[in-house]
Amino acid sequence: MTARKEFATVALWATNMAQPLNGIGAWLAKVEEKLAEARAGGADVLVLPEYASEQWLSYAPAGLKPTEEVAWMAEEGRKALEALPALVERSGVALLAGSFPVEAPGRDPDGPPHVNRAHLILPDGRTIAQDKLCLTPGEKSADAWNLNTGSKVELVEWNGLRIASLICLDVELPALAAKIARSEPDLDLLLVPSMTEKQSGYSRVFDCAKARAVELQTAVCAVGCIGSVAPDGSRPNYSGAAVFTPCEAELGFDGRFAAVPGAAETQGDGPMLIARDVPVGMIRQIREGGRAEVWPGSWDADGVAVGG
């Protein structure tokens, strides 16, 4: 691995889902624009929200049923994955292309054929796939998207950074974070694409992302969708973008490095937060050097009893 970076710049695009598209080419053109904007801002990586693919439903065939949406988005996703690596290579900026359904076997080979997968596409030609591990009721419902689950947290080393991704609900699970802390304690960036319908969901994901920054002693970067792809507002999204760091005096005390506030509606393509010079080197030194005020390190509760 190359020398570890001391600073990382992260771009987070809180996509306006109410902006209609006329085909996958229009979406790819927008992504290319945002990659160029991210590059101009000095970003190492651009992160899109969970189910960025739902914006594609603005040009889906009329009468597409909820039970048919996943397979249709998976087909559009194949087209997107054919084109995205070239855009990333030209820009030199890594891209977490949100997430979208992919046909792939899960832990249960007799279960549903699709997973919710985030793709981290790197300028060196690699693509790292991260499947969502814990699903919402709608994602599991046979009357809706009927998805399968992943079974592994992937870690990648690139450009002097160690990066992992957790999709939305996955970042809310302390047991998963504790397992990551024991197995992969040396993270620089945890990327969290999300999609939340209400302010309550946004608050759960983003507040838990901040907690993970404390628990893992790393920088956590979260971004979600804003607005409804349906003109009648029947598919609302409420979110924003933020970069969290451990709550340490050296890092500014409150753990909020940069943020775009949550919102139910927005203008244009949606806000893009460029968080410049996230101090991943200083965080690493605090994590490794025992400089945190009270952090106990990779701690589990295996020896703790509960109850009478």
Image (cartoon, rainbow, N blue to C red):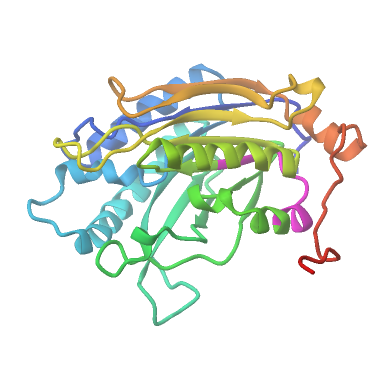
**In this view, 65 is above or below 264:** below
Q: Position of residue 207 (x, y in %)?
A: 57, 37
Q: Residue at x 39, y 22 (%)?
A: 271
State left or right for residue 69 relative to residue 128. left
Region of the chain picked out in magenta, as a range: 180-191
Residue closest to the far front:
308
Please tell me how many numbered marks the rendered image carries: 0
**In this view, 113 is above or below 248:** below
Residue closest to the far right:
290
Camera-nearest residue between 212 and 122 = 212
Q: Residue at x 80, y 35 (%)?
A: 284
Camera-nearest residue between 166 and 301 = 301
Q: Position of residue 299 (x, y in %)?
A: 82, 53
**In this view, 55 is above or below 300:** above
**In this view, 148 is above or below 38:** below
Res 102 visible: no
